[in-house]
Image: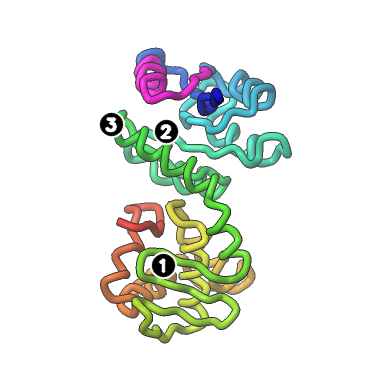
Amino acid sequence: MSTQPPKRRAILVIEDETDILEVLRYNLSKNGYDVLTAESGEKGLDMANAKVPDMVLLDLMLPGVDGLEVCRQLRSRERTRAIPIIMLTAKGSEADIVLGLTLGADDYVAKPFSPTELVARIKAVLRRNEGGTGRREAEEAGMMRLGPIVLDAQKHEVTIDNSPVSLTLSEFKLLRFLVQRRGRVFTRDQLLDAVVGPDVFVTARNIDVHVGALRRKLGDAGRYIITVRGVGYRMEET
């Protein structure tokens, strides 16, 4: 009985620099992806709406409609809002990175980038967005796992290697938010909204205190909370 080959994933690259575009096209094709390209934000939006790719690689510095606006529009449209987005950013543009993540980008890679690292990030984001049926069902039931960490949302319990960990309500909410969205980078403001809500007046740096306390209580597993310099935090197995 013949079997169908696995469907190739389509990645839309929105980038106006020809040299970078060709490097991306070559490396992505070599790794088994179908590559769509657009050299402006307007064309990228049209192609994303027409083709609905499996992922968008989005340069922030685009002529006309810039990358941040493209990200905002992709997330605001029902047809494209679920497409994973990785931003391509110039080094030092931390404000743009923070704003892009706030608008809904899944990750970012700073230029100049390693093609190997970029492909690894792409695979991680696609894997995260697919998820596994078993994991999704478990998380819907309130059970989450990451490495030795087991979080039971219904019982409000956390264990590491079967040993209970005592967390405050804020620490528990922070851990649950990060584990559910493992691998994604979140700004301090986004994490504060998740922990204390948008209507409570506290400074964004307060999240550093929560993260520090949570890391200490998690012990060796605290290394899974990764600081993204100038931006915020993400959680993933290392």
CA separation in Å, label 2 and label 1:
26 Å
Image quadrant where one finds the N terminus: top right
Please identify, in this view, whether the residue under mark 2 or under mark 3 is nearer the observer: 3
Q: Is residue 23 left or right of residue 143?
A: left
Q: Amino acid at mark 2?
A: Leu
Q: Find numbered disc 1 in the image and state the secondary structure of the residue it sits on.
A: loop
Which is more toward the observer, 209 or 145? Answer: 145
Q: Which picture quadrant has residue 222?
A: bottom left
Q: Which picture quadrant has residue 165?
A: bottom left
CA separation in Å, label 2 and label 3:
12 Å
Query: From the viewer's perspective, is residue 227 above or below residue 15?
Result: below
CA separation in Å, label 1 and label 3:
31 Å
Residue hosting label 3: 114
Q: State the extent of the magenta-drawn residues as a range.
A: 22-37
Q: Amino acid at mark 1?
A: Arg
The residue positioned 32% from the left and 53% from the top of the image is 229
- In the rendered structure, find residue 205 and report the number of the disc placed on it: 1
Q: Find numbered disc 3 in the image and state the secondary structure of the residue it sits on.
A: loop
